[in-house]
Image: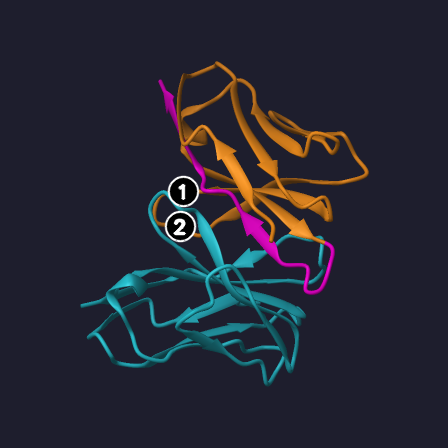
Amino acid sequence: NAGVTQTPKFQVLKTGQSMTLQCAQDMNHEYMSWYRQDPGMGLRLIHYSVGAGITDQGEVPNGYNVSRSTTEDFPLRLLSAAPSQTSVYFCASKRDPRGEQFFGPGTRLTVL
Amino acid sequence: GENVEQHPSTLSVQEGDSAVIKCTYSDSASNYFPWYKQELGKRPQLIIDIRSNVGEKKDQRIAVTLNKTAKHFSLHITETQPEDSAVYFCAASINTGGFKTIFGAGTRLFVKA
C-alpha cells in the first residue's frame, strides 16, 4: 500500500493564481481531511469528508474548496491564491471516526 | 466549535528525565484524544490515543491521562531519550457530524544528552 500520497511536494504560486493540491489514499478509508500547518499554530483543519459526495468545513475553510467524487481522492482547490495561504498542507485519512489518522507527506506551498 | 489548548509550547529536559505535556478541550462531545509526534521535516504520526471511557493508558515509556470532568488530558514521557526530541500534538475528535479532529498548537520537546 502506498498509504496517503500528495502531489506536488513543492509549489510556488503568484498572488491570484489558482491550483489544486492532490491527495489520494489506497486504504479504502471513508474519512479524509485537509490541514494546514503554520509555525506555532499547529495543524488547522481546512475541510473534511466522511465519504464520497460528503464534505464539510473545518476551522479555516475560506479561500479553499474541496470535492470528494471517489473514496480514494480528495483534492483541495485554491481559488485565488494569497500570501496568507503560504503554508505546509497535509492530507490525512482514517478508517474509523475514533481511529488513527494517516498523514500524507505534505505539500509546501509558497504564494508570492 | 471545539478548541484545543496545549502547554507548554516549548519544553527542554535532560536525558532520562520525564516530560509532561498538557491539553485542554472545550467541547464536552469530544470522545477521542490522540497524540501525534512530528519529527523535523516529516509527517505527524500517532504515538498513543485514549477514548473517553478510559482514564489512563500506557505504552512502554509513554502514558496518557484523561480527566473528562475537567476537560483536560496529558502526555507523560518517562526516561526521555534524544530521539524523543520532536514536536508533539494533542488532538480531540468530536463525536458529532463528521467526527472532525482538532489539534493543539504543538509542543516542541528538546531532550538534551
Residue tagged 1:
B39
Q: Is residue B105 above or below residue B61?
A: below
Q: Amino acid at mark 1?
A: Glu
Residue A41's x, y, as percent? 40, 46
Residue drawn at x 35%, y 51% as measured from the top left: A38
Q: Residues within 10 Å of mark 1 (few under 14, many from 20)?
A: some
Chain assigned orange: B
The three-letter code of the residue at mark 2 reads Lys
Q: In the displayed structure, does residue A13 sit left or right of residue A77?
A: left
Chain letter for the residue marked with disc 2 in the picture: B
Q: Where, quadrant-wise, is the N terminus of chain A in this rendering?
A: bottom right
Chain A drawn in what color? cyan
**Over which residues does the magenta segment extend?**
B95-113
Which of the pair B69/A93 is nearer the observer? B69
Name the residue at the right extreme: B53
Q: Is residue B79 above or below residue B95?
A: above
Above/below status of B36 relative to A104: above
Q: Secondary structure at mark 1?
A: loop
Q: Residue at x 56, y 57 (%)?
A: A102
* Mark 2 element type: loop
**At 46% from the left edge and 62% from the top edge, which residue is drawn?**
A60
The answer to which image quadrant residue B50 occupies is top right
Q: Quadrant of the C terminus of chain A?
A: bottom left
Marks 2 & 1, CB-CB < 8 Å contact? yes
Q: Quadrant of residue B66?
A: top right
Q: Chain of mark 1?
A: B
Mark 2 burial class by Cα count in 10 Å: few <14, some 14-19, many 20+: few
- Residue denoted by label 2: B42
Residue A47 is tagged as none
